[in-house]
Amino acid sequence: MKKLFLLLAVVMGNLLILGCSSIEEPPVSDDPVDFWEKTSLSANRISCLEIGPNDYIYVGTFGYQGLFRSTDNGQTWETINDNILEQTKLITFLGYNSDINYLFAAFGTLFYSNDDGESWTKLSSTVTTHFRMVASNGYRIYAGGSDRILSGNISTSGNQISLGLSGFPRERKPLSLISYPEGNSYYVGSDRGLYRKIDNSSEKWELIGLKDRRVVAIAVNSWGKIFAGCEDENGGNIDVFSSTNEKDWISTELAGEKRRIACLLVDSNDDLYAGTRFRGIFRLRNKKWTEINTGIPETIEEFPQRRVTSLRINSWGYLYVGMDGQGLYRSKSPIE
C-alpha cells in the first residue's frame, strides 16, 4: 500500500512551524470490472460462430454437440439440426450472406439454408474438396478446403448453387478466406502468403505479400486497410501485419508467447480484435494492443487456456467470442 506524505505549515505567533505527516492511499482493486459475461448456451466446445442481419446467433460445435440458434441475443437457445445435419453434428465453419439471407455450414460437406436454419440443402458440386470455409456476396460464392478454392453462382431463384475451380494455385494450401464487397475482391490466406482476386474478372489470383508466412486469419477495415494474422510453418513468429496498399506490410507488434492467431475482427470504430488459440482476446486501438479477457476463467476443467475459435459482433455493438472448452461469452455492454 502506498503512502502520501503531506507538508504541514502552522503559524503560531511570529513562528512558522513546519511538519510532515503521512496518510494511507486507498488500495487499488485487483479485480477490475469484467469485460465479458457467459451466455446461457450449454455447449462448451464452440467451433464457429455467425450472426445474421436479424441478429440471430448461430453457433457450431465440436464434440458432436450440434448446431444452435438464438433469436433473443443469446438469452435462450435451440438446436437446429434437421435430418441432414443430424448425420454429423460436427460444424467447423459458419458463414452468412446478408445480401440474400443465406446461411452456410461446412464440415467437409457444404450445406446452405435460406430460412434462418430451419432446413438445410446439401451443396452438390462437380469438383470435390473437404469444405471448411465460405465467403459470399450477392449471388457469388467462394468456398474452399485444404487443397483448393472453388467459385460459382447462386441462382436468383434461390434453389441452386454451382461451383467450379477458381484458378487458385494448386500448389498452395488455403487457410483462410474472406470477401471484401467494397473492392469486389476475395482474399485467401495460404501456407505461403496472401492472395487476392477481383471477382468476375479475367485476372488471376495475385500474391500480394507475406510469401514466407502462413496467413491464418484476414480482416479488412472500413477504408480498405488489410490485416493478416500470420505464423511460420512451425507455429512460431506469430504476428498481425497490416497494409494499406497491398504491397508494404507493417507489423502491429502482437508478437508474444503462444499468441497463435485463430481469428480477426474489425468493429465499427475500426478497432481490430484478435482471438488467439491459447491466450484469449486482444484489441488493437490507437496502434496499441490490449488484452481483454476479464470475466473469462483462465482454466475450466480439462481446458487450461482461453482457446478462442471465433469472434463476431451484432448490430447493437455487442461482441461475442466462442471458445473450445469455455463456451460462448458476450461483452457486458456494447463496445465503444
Image (cartoon, grey):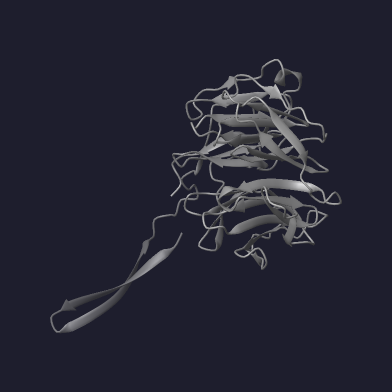
Residue 46, image x and y in percent?
66, 33
Q: Is residue 184 above or below residue 125?
A: below
Whether residue 200 sits left or right of residue 129 in the image: it is: left
The residue most toward the front is 202
The residue most toward the top is 83
Residue 161, image x and y in percent?
69, 30
Of 303 and 177, nearer the camera is: 177
Q: Note whether residue 214 is visible.
A: yes
The residue most toward the left is 13
Of 92 and 17, nearer the camera is: 92
> Residue at the spot x=61%, y=20% of the render?
79
Of 97 and 192, nearer the camera is: 97
Q: Note whether residue 277 is visible.
A: no
Give the image quarter of residue 328.
Answer: top right
Residue 260, image x and y in percent?
71, 51
Residue 85, image x and y in percent?
71, 21
Q: Is residue 252 above or below residue 28?
A: below
Whether residue 23 sits left or right of residue 235 in the image: it is: left
Q: Is residue 267 above or below residue 153?
A: below
